[in-house]
Image: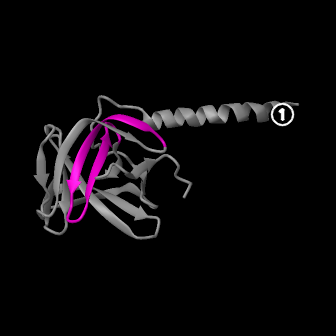
Amino acid sequence: MKSIFTFFTLLICLPLFSQTEGQSFCSELENEDYFPLTIEKKKILWLDSYYFEEIIGSKEIKNKKYIEFAQNWKAGNAGSLLLREKNGVIYQYEKCCDTETIRFDSKFEKGKSWKTADKKSNYSIKSFNGKLKTPYCDYKNLLVIKGEFTNVTYFFYYKKGYGYIGATDDKNNLISCVSPEWNKK
């Protein structure tokens, strides 16, 4: 009898627990930054693949200390990203040009645009009230940055306290989002 009671208790409680986890994953963090550099690890879905992005250490380049993020893809390929913050500005070190590109400045306003260090891509602030629906969450109050690259345009979405949470193409099709399901393919 005890085992039947335990089974039904688990059956009832597990969905409630996962719903709480989902709400935590999706909730707003109003007093946080759009680009926190403290998130240890994320799973990011991209089209029909995914990658894990995680902090693996730091590197000093030209007397500036960067946090190094590894991006390990499902297929086994890997990349890295070097970011640092100073006075509310997030910088990305660009290996191509041996210099930095601004990823975001907390003083930027809607309409602000800037180019990457190699001058090949353009970014602009589209909104601070963006919305994005993913298979996991219905987000609102997001920073939306338009990225115009050589042959494609994306809209990147950032949530306060969590950073990057997804992207759409120029036709508003969801192409990427963060996932709380780390063990699923």
> Pointer 1: what residue?
4
What is the x, y in percent for residue 88?
17, 40
User: Please, is residue 137 above or below residue 68 in the view?
Assistant: above
Q: Determine if the magenta segment contains residue 152.
A: yes
Q: Secondary structure at mark 1?
A: helix
Q: Compare residues 165 and 122 and report the one nearer the observer.
A: 122
Residue 37 at least partly seen: no
Q: Position of residue 48 (x, y in %)?
A: 46, 61
- Report the predominant secondary structure element of the magenta stretch: strand
108 on left or right of 27: left
Q: Which residues are magenta?
A: 136-162
Residue in view at x 33 percent, y 45 percent: 38
Nearest the eye: 39 or 122: 122
Question: Residue 179 at what x, y percent from top left?
Answer: 47, 48
Mark 1 residue crowding within 10 angstroms, few (<14) / some (14–19) / many (20+): few
Residue 185 seen anywhere in this rendered image of the structure = yes
| Residue drawn where x is 49% and y is 46% of the image | 180
For this view, does 6 lie left or right of residue 139? Answer: right
Can you tell which quarter of the image residue 30 is in? top left
Foreground of the two, 59 or 154: 154
